[in-house]
Structure formats: C-alpha cells, structure tokens
Image (cartoon, rainbow, N blue to C red):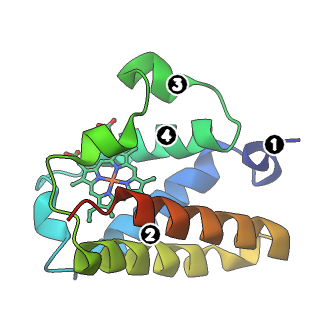
C-alpha cells in the first residue's frame, strides 16, 4: 500500500496543504512570493503531493512533468526563504501528527527537508 492510501488519500493532503498555507500567512519573506489568491497554488500542491506519495498521476496530467527546480527558478529561494517554507510545512505536519504513525511522519518530514534544501537557488 502506498503512503497516499495509508493516510486516506487526497483529503489528507488537502488538510496538510491548508495548514501549510495558513502557517505561511505570517511569513514576510515567503508569503509575498505567492499570489494573493492561493487557490491554484493549493490545488497544484495537493495534486503534486498526492502523486508523489503514490496517488493518481493527476498532477502530471494537468501540469506535466514536475521539474520542481525549474518551476522554482523565478523565485529567490535563499536560506531564509527555505527555512521559512520548511517551518510552515513542519507546523502543518505537526497539525496532522495524530493521523500519522512514526514511520509515515519521519518519511514526510525528511522528504520535505531534503526537497526544500534542493530547491534553494540563491
Ligand atoms: C519541499 C519543498 C517544495 C515542494 C515539494 C514544492 C512544490 C511546489 C509545487 C508542486 C508547486 C506548483 C508548481 C506548478 O505546478 O505550478 C510550487 C509552486 C511554488 N513554490 Fe514550491 N515547493 C517547495 C519549496 C518551495 C520553497 C522553499 C519556496 C520558496 C521559498 C517555494 C515557493 C513556491 C512558489 C512561490 C510557487 C508558485 C505558486 C503559484 O504561483 O501559484 N516552494 N511548489
């Protein structure tokens, strides 16, 4: 069973992504990089994470190959921006902690810190 199925599918990722963007609201470095209206950004993130953790390939169908480094090239991802992004995601993960077992939590936590590090581009 994929992690996507284990956690109950797309609704889990919707909760995670909502909590992530709520936490990001107070980040003066990263929040301004996103558009005012977050609905598209939320949808893309939900579809990407669902696909990444073994769900349906809807992200690929709608957006094409993820190419995350290329898609993040327009943004100045400094160490500070990376840390702010990751702090918001860690807060989001903490908010769903009760829905995950230790292994699932550790897997997601380490993926996000590794990926955020890879996307740093300044
Ligand atoms: C684990 C690390 C990260 C992952 C998995 C991730 C994933 C994504 C995905 C899937 C998108 C949507 C791409 C699309 O289809 O258009 C996106 C957009 C974006 N990401 Fe990230 N990202 C990460 C880290 C970061 C960091 C560190 C920053 C900045 C500090 C950042 C800023 C943005 C911005 C500004 C957008 C565009 C949103 C929009 O215009 O709608 N991301 N990211």
Q: CA distance from mark 1 to mark 4?
A: 15 Å
Is the residue marked 4 within 8 Å of ligand 1, measured from its CB? Answer: yes
Circle 2 residues within 10 Å: few <14, some 14–19, many ≥20: many
Label 4: few (<14), some or many (≥20) within 10 Å? Answer: many
Q: At which x and y percent is residue 114? A: 53, 65
**Does residue 20 lie above or below 50 as drawn?**
below
Name the residue tied to disc 4.
48
Please give the residue where the numbered disc 2 appears in the rendered image: 19
Helix, strand or loop for disc 3: helix
Numbered circle sitting on residue 58: 3
Expressed as whole percent of the image width and height from the top left, the position of residue 107 reads 72, 65
Q: Earlier in the sequence, mark 1 or mark 4?
A: 1
Q: Nearer the viewer, mark 4 or mark 2?
A: 4
Whether residues under marks 3 and 2 lie with C-beta atoms below 8 angstroms apart, the answer is no
If the image is split into quadrants, where does the N terminus sit? Answer: top right
4 and 2 marks in contact (CB < 8 Å): no
Q: Position of residue 49 (x, y in %)?
A: 54, 46
CB contact under 8 Å: marks 1 and 4: no
Q: Residues within 10 Å of mark 3 (few under 14, many from 20)?
A: some
């Amino acid at each position: 069973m994929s992690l996507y199925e284990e956690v109950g599918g797309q609704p889990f990722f919707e909760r995670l992504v909502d909590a992530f963007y709520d936490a990001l609201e107070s980040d003066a470095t990263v929040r301004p990089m996103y558009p005012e209206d977050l609905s598209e950004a939320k949808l893309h993130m939900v579809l990407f994470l669902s696909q990444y953790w073994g769900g349906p390939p809807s992200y690929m169908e709608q957006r094409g190959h993820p190419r995350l480094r290329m898609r993040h090239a327009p943004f100045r991802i400094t160490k500070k921006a990376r840390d702010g992004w990751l702090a918001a995601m860690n807060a989001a993960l903490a908010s769903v902690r009760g829905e995950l077992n230790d292994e699932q939590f550790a897997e997601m936590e380490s993926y996000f810190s590794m990926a955020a590090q890879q996307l740093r581009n300044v």
